[in-house]
Image (cartoon, grey):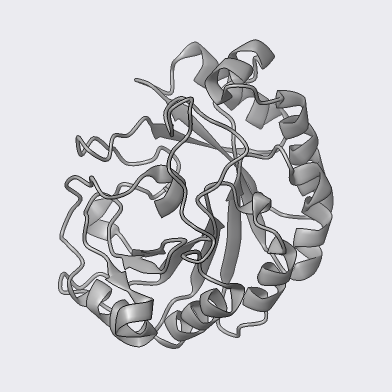
Amino acid sequence: MYDRYNRPITYLRVSVTDRCNLRCTYCMPAEGVKLLSHHDILSFEEIVLVVTEAVSLGITKVRITGGEPLVRKGIISLVGQISAIGGILDFGLTTNGILLPGFASALAGAGLHRINISLDTIDPVKYKAITRGGDILKVFEGIEAAKKAGLDPVKINCVVRNSSDEPDAEAVRNFCRENGLQARFIHEMSLADGCFTIVENGHGGDCPNCNRLRLTANGMIRPCLFNDMQFSIRELGIREALEKAVGLKPEKGGVSITGGFHNIGG
């Protein structure tokens, strides 16, 4: 699939839930957010149908996101169903890592290729403050479990306020270097203000070369994170929603006020 700016669209990010077991300060307010009803959340069958159709149209890379995808009941089954779809060359999942110690081996066994883990500091006190209660030791255990399971490369997503030269980011960089991990630095973003930059050591935010579509937890295909455009797979049908999203994908990001990182998938 090519959009109207001749960009090949090969990457689908799939949000499987808007729920999360953390309350990171840059993602959602302390009191949480209004969650989707279970009726609105896509079933596994619907997700698999979307991914299958997307692959038939040229998608080769799939990433499962959330919210926190590991809180979705039966996630291992979904990973297995998606991994069985022929044509997926790169199959990953992004997680905060808290539940990963109990999931890494099963995820690998179900066919997941690799994993990204969010980690903005290696200081336990700062981590607890940023995540409003998270236990960084669980994340460290999750990282080791992912390495042991062969979910390579294990990438660390580190959100920075101003620069990857900040002390916490530098500590994360050194931690990754010492532990055979790949560090990626994501400048703190604002959907409503249209504030984003290219991910350091990654590809996100690179509008001229964007190859992404997003499937939200409630069945919307979004061609751009920083745009309110979305197409319902339930109202339009899967193929038409995908084709409209590709055909109308904007040249570059702007602003978005109809969603959040917790339900679009970042």
Task: Decide if residue 213 is on the left or right side of residue 129.
Answer: left
Given residues 184 and 64, the one toward you in this image is 64
The residue nearer to you, when weighing 69 against 143, is 69
Q: Residue at x 77, y 25 (%)?
A: 137
Residue 52 is left or right of residue 147, and the answer is left
State the count of labels: 0
Q: Is residue 124 above or below residue 185?
A: above
Q: Nearer the viewer, residue 35 or 72?
A: 35
What residue appears at the point 16 percent right and 69 percent down from the top-left corner? 5
Quadrant assignment, res 119: top right
Q: Quadrant of residue 126?
A: top right
Query: In this rendering, is residue 26 above or below 2?
Result: above
Residue 1 horizontal/vertical position (percent): 31, 81
Q: Residue at x 66, y 50 (%)?
A: 71
162 lies left or right of 172: left
Visible in this render: residue 1? Answer: no
Residue at the image point whose x is 57% and y is 16% from the top:
129
Q: Position of residue 215 (x, y in %)?
A: 42, 65
In the rendered image, is residue 252 in sight?
Answer: yes
Front residue of 41 and 184:
41
Residue 189 image position (x, y, % from top left): 32, 34
Residue 226: x and y, percent? 25, 49
Q: Viewed as shown, does residue 233 lie left or right of 107?
A: left
Determine whether 184 is above or below 61 in the image: above
